[in-house]
Structures are given as structure tokens and as C-alpha cells.
Image: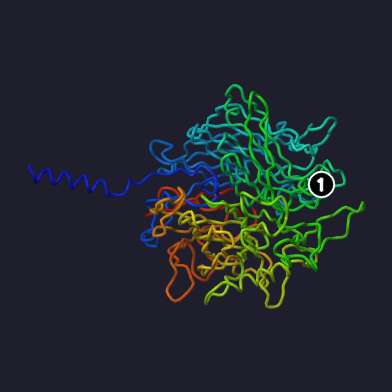
Amino acid sequence: MKFAMAGYLSAVFFFLLAPPASQAVSINERAGNHFRTASNNQEFILNKSNVNNAQFGLLNTFNFDAKVETQPLVLEKGINGNDLVIVTTMKNKVIGINAKTNNKVYEKELGPPINTITRKDGKETQDMDMWGHTPDWGISATPIIDPSTNTLFVAAWVQKNKGDDRYRDYKVFILDAKTGDKKAEPVRIFGQSQEGNDCWFNDANAVDGQGKQYTYPKLRAGLALTGNKGLVLAFAANGEHPNDDKRDNPHGFVIAYDTRALLNQQGFSRDPAIFCTTAFNSWGGGIWQAGGAPVTEGDMIYVATSNGTSNNGGDDLTESMIKLRYLPSLSGKRPELQKTDWYKAFLDERTSGAGCLWQDNTSEVSCGRAVPPPPGPNGEFRLRAGTDWDFGSSGPLLIPGSDVLLQGTKDGIIYALDKTDLGHNDRFNKLMFRPPLIGSYFSGDKDGETQQSWLRANELNRSIPCVVDDDWFTPCKIEGGPENGRTHHIHALALTQKDAGGGIVYVWGENASLKAYDFSTTRDRRPVFRAEGEELASARIGAPGGMPGGLLMVSGKPSKLQGAPDTAIDFDTALVWAVYAKCGDANKGFAEGELIAYDATSILPGSRNMKRLFSTGNVGGCHGGLGMMSRMIPPVVANGKVYVMIYRVEGYDKVIGSQLKAFGLK
């Protein structure tokens, strides 16, 4: 009896000490969570010991008959106890796939997509893709799943009148995530901005007597949900230039719906809240974020804008971080978006010169990034190609449990902002540390501190105001300077968070290597270079060129540290995954992609190099092993599998569809 009791107590003691059972996780949105950390800390299968070329590899593929430009979502145990992978296409199809059997579960078509091909003088062009790779335009932004109602929200671009591609409607569809069935009727996105700046969300018949549809909105940023029942969509526009007819000027928009209204709950308005980033007489401020979704926290929304008019105070918020508060529908009234704060990184209208660009880190206004062109016929500012330095070239990342809001830009810099005080201005004293971190090119002084990085950041900014034959793909080159003849755009960030005090931030800029920086959430404590990968994105392509650099995701187990945020990761288990263009440019053309996995925290002895665990390609060559890289879709890691989307290309220049590759333990 004593022996039995002792065994029983031992069993209880073992049970209490045993780690929790592995938990499956859903990937409901772009970058894994509303902070956009591009991390999953519920990965209990893949680890540093089994992710290698001997044990890990390709399991299966699934072909699509259309181009895919959106990140796959994963609904854990969504079909007969197996994961359900949800993919949306440019032909407005929503497709559910059983992750275990690789069989199609459902396929729903939301409406006729837009054929963007136009023919003039015997030449064929595409009015939404300057490179001519996207003839059909339908679902172009990553959808989102609301787990509280099992609702999949999808935005699709459809013909207003079947067979007529001239007039085009954006609609939000409300679907059952498990079955793809319609839960409620879709809503047509339409209305006037609540800013009182005369902006309309462009649509046919938006204004009385309007006989044509003006500049088409362009939806690329992923959808987001606020903590108070708001569905958020962020738009850019097709084209980045002002027009003689101001009604045809492009604008950025943030649209928000009450999700309860979309599900037909009584007492809530189905009309959207609409915020326009620039005034009617101005232009620009598009939100594209390389497909990244807005950051949301509670009722707050953070978006990063790009080129356009910016010297009109708080009315024209181009090249800016904007903070909005979502106010839900009450008593049947339309919801609202309130502008609460903003930070302007630089002004496109002003030229660079004496007194600009970090000359005074505490007060000076930052000037434009390139020599401006001659004014238009009426003296108005005209953007020239040389000024395409989008502040919003990546999506923002909010470090959970802190006030630190990070933003990667086309000038290769990572800005750290205080979410509680963006400043309502463009003064440098609002940055969390100054000057900001240079996130591409050089890693800093590898023998010790990173002071050289700050000097190079200064030089980088002073080198930017150059235009060569109006070609914005040509970076300025200073002999021996930081640009080193290479481009520098940042299109993705990822975070391995250790605790509320910080962690490791990863960035992989164009024509650069993956870099890791130790980040602190303490004000004025500068990031410190930690390590980098050995692979160079677009390695054999001459400058300029090289989109998009590397697209990232981190996986691992939850942190064991007491008081760590819910998103924190156990450093002993963290992996960082990347897809990058091996040798070419995956935007203007097509480039062989490679999937690679690194130990996210270890550094090889005697070096400052990260430890590579797995790759699909060959070392040093141009074979990436994936096929043609999808230009803005990061890898997705969930429940022991890694999902990667590629293009299916006929010849060298015609997309015939896409393919989902699933990797896992063999």
C-alpha cells in the first residue's frame, strides 16, 4: 500500500512538472497577430534539432489557376480535426484546403474579377500593374478571420456591371471560415471622408453628375480587426502623381466597418467610417505597406503612408505614421475614425540642402529625399520618379507590452516611434532614439560597438537626394559611402521578443543580407548589431534592383520568463524563416526564390554570422529550389508545417497561376 501511494504521488509530482501539451495554433491574419511581429510562439513541433535538410523538406504542393498575392491563413482543426489552409486568388476565389490530405475542401467565387488589360495603338498594357504581370485583379489583400465568430472577412474587387471592366466596386464579403459559405450579404465600399476634406472613396457615381470612375483605389495592405469590433481596410491608389482634374487625384484611405453590422446584428450601421490621408485638393498618402496589415491595439489603429503632398500641416499626411481611434457604431449611427496623432518622416516637396536631414536631431524638419522636378503648368508640385522614398514600404510593428512602434522604409532606415506621443509634427526629437537605425547595407562595427552605423546613417541620408535620368531605381552613389551601389528598401520586419524589455529585431533589405539587432524598449537605448546571415538577396543582379529582399517569420515555443508578454518566445527554441530572391528581381520580373531557416538566437563561434539550419537552394549558386518567388508573401509557420506561395510561370514572363508548397518533417 505504501508503495502504491508513493507511486501515485510520484505520478502526480511528474504531472505537475511536465510541460503543457502541445497546442495547435491558428494564423488568422497577416504577420500572425495584430502587433504584426511576424512571429508564432505556439510552435511545438519544429525546433532547432529537427529543422535540417535530412529531416525537414517538401511534403506536397497545391496549384491555383490564378495569381495569388495574399498570405495563406491557417484555421487549426478547421476540417475533421485537421488544419484548414485558406487561400484567396486574383480571380476572386476563396479556397479551403485540408492541410493533412492536401484535398480541396471548398472553392467559392465572389464575383467577376477585373480584367486590367487595355489595348491602344496595337500595344497591350495593364492598368493596375506597371510590369504587366497581373491581368486579373480581384482579391489583392490578405483577409482576416475573427475567431470569436468564425467569420472570414474578404475584400474583393468586382465588376459593377458584369462584362464591363470600366466601373469597379470593392466589396467586403462575410463568410464562414470553415465552409466558405456566405454568412451575410456583402457590402459595397462607398462614401465620403469624415475629415471634411471633400475626399470620396472613388467610385462610379460617387458625386452627382460624375460620368466616369476616377483613379482606382488599390488594396494591398492586409485586413485588420480592432479590439472593439472594427474591421479595418487600408488603401493606396493606382498611380502616384497629381492630375489636372483634381477629382482624379489619388488618395490614401482607411475604411472601417462595425463587424456586428456586417453580421446583421440589429442596432448597428453597415455604413463605413472613412478617413482620407490627404485633402481633396492634394494627393497621395497611399497605404500599401508591402502587403502588411495595419497595427491595431484596443481601439487604436496605426498605418504608414507613402508619397505625395505633405507640407499642409495635419491635413496632408503623406510619408507619415498615422494613429487613428476607431469608434464603433452606436444607436444605428455610422462608426467613426478619429485622427489622434501623427509623425511625418520627411517632406516630399522640400529639397535637401543646408539645414536638412539630421543637422539638428532635436528640432529640424526633415526634407525631401530627392531633387524635385520643375513645377507643373500652374506652379504645383509634381512628384518625379526620384522622390519615391515611401515611408510606408513595410508595415509597422508594435513591440508588445511597450510603447515602441517600428517602421521600415525605402531609405533603408528603421524608425522607432513612441506610440503614445508621435508628436503631431515631423521633429526628430519624437524618435525613440536618434539618429534612427540603418537597417540595410552594413551591420556596423563588427569588432565591437555600432557607432559606425550611426555615422553611416547620417551619410545615407545626405546621399539620398540624387536623381539619375529620373530613374528611381537608381540609388545615389557616394564613393565608399553606405549605399555602395545597392538599393536599400525594407519591406519586412520580424521580432523574437524575450520579455517586455525587448528582444531581437530582424530585417532583410534589398540587395542585403538578413540582419539581427538586439533591441531595447528603453528610450534612447540604441539597437546593437547582433549577427547576420551569409546569403545576399538578389546577389547577382547589378544595382539598381533586387526587390523585395527577404520576407520573414519567427517560430518557437512560448517564453518561460515570468511576466513576459503573451507573444514572447523561448530563445532556446526560436527559428527565423525567410523567403528571398536568390539572384533576380521578383517585382519587375521573376526571380528564383529560396526558403531558408536560421537559428534565431545563436551566433557561430568566432564570427558574427547566424547559424543556418535549412535551405531549399544551393550555396553560392542561383538555384533557390522554390520556383518563382511571390514578391510580397512571407512564409507561414503553423503546427509543424511551413507554407510558401510561389508563382507558376510559363516561359519567363507569363504568370499562369500560383502554387502553395507545404514543408514539414519527412
Question: From what the image shows, is residue 229 above or below residue 102?
Answer: above
Task: Specify the quadrant of the image occupied by residue 79.
Answer: top left
Residue 561: percent from left, percent from top: 40, 54
Residue 63: percent from left, percent from top: 52, 47
Q: Residue furthest right?
A: 378
Quarter of the picture holding the C terminus: bottom left
Closest to the observer: 438 or 618?
438
Question: From what the image shows, is residue 198 above or below residue 566?
Answer: above
Closest to the observer: 136 or 470?
470
> Left or right: where does residue 487 sit relative to residue 32?
right
- Determine if residue 398 is in view: yes
Task: Specify the quadrant of the image occupied by residue 141.
Answer: top right
Residue labelled with disc 1: 282
Quarter of the picture holding the N terminus: top left
The mark tally for this picture is 1
Closest to the observer: 15 or 116?
15
Task: Specify the quadrant of the image occupied by residue 524.
Answer: bottom right
Residue type pointed to by label 1: Ser
Question: From what the image shows, is residue 595 above or below residue 333?
Answer: below
Q: How many C-alpha atoms fall within 10 Å of the one at disc 1: few (<14), some, or many (≥20)?
A: many
- Determine if residue 649 is in view: no
**Label 1's element?**
loop
At 35% across and 47% down in the image, what residue appears?
22
Q: How is the image coloured?
A: rainbow
At 67% across and 26% down in the image, what residue appears?
333
Closest to the observer: 92 or 366?
366
> Left or right: where does residue 398 sit relative to residue 426?
left
